[in-house]
Amino acid sequence: MTTAVLNKQFTPSTFRSTSEDVLKKGLGAMTIACEQLTKQNNQLNKDINNLKQKLRSAEEKLIINSEEKE
């Protein structure tokens, strides 16, 4: 076997990919990452809104309790 044949057989597919294939795979990975970050951001925004509501509720209870003590 020639060296070229041996190199082709034992070279990982990553190194045999065309630049277009590498860019497509990279774009696909970035798309998945972006989608996951968007989902996480939406969940964090929901959590923030829930915490704001709990804070408002606790503040109202505190005001009511302080008024009752007076």
Image (spheres, rainbow, N blue to C red):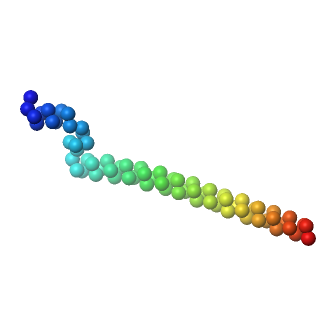
Residue at the (67%, 59%) spot, across then down: 51
Residue at the (12%, 33%) spot, across then down: 5
In the picture, measured across the screen, residue 12 lies left or right of residue 28, that is: left
In the picture, measured across the screen, residue 40 lies left or right of residue 48, that is: left
Q: Is residue 1 positioned above or below 35 on the image?
A: above
Residue at the (91%, 67%) spot, across then down: 69
Quadrant into which the C terminus falls: bottom right
**Residue 52 picture location, percent across and down:** 67, 62
Q: Is residue 4 positioned above or below 55 on the image?
A: above
Front residue of 70 and 32: 70
State how many labels appear: 0
Q: Is residue 3 positioned above or below 15 on the image?
A: above
Residue at the far left in the pictured view: 2
Front residue of 2 and 56: 2
Quadrant into which the N terminus falls: top left
**Residue 62 picture location, percent across and down:** 81, 65
**Residue 58 picture location, percent across and down:** 76, 61
**Residue 26 picture location, percent across and down:** 32, 50
Residue 17, picture quadrant:
top left
In the picture, measured across the screen, residue 21 lies left or right of residue 5, that is: right
Residue 47, picture quadrant:
bottom right
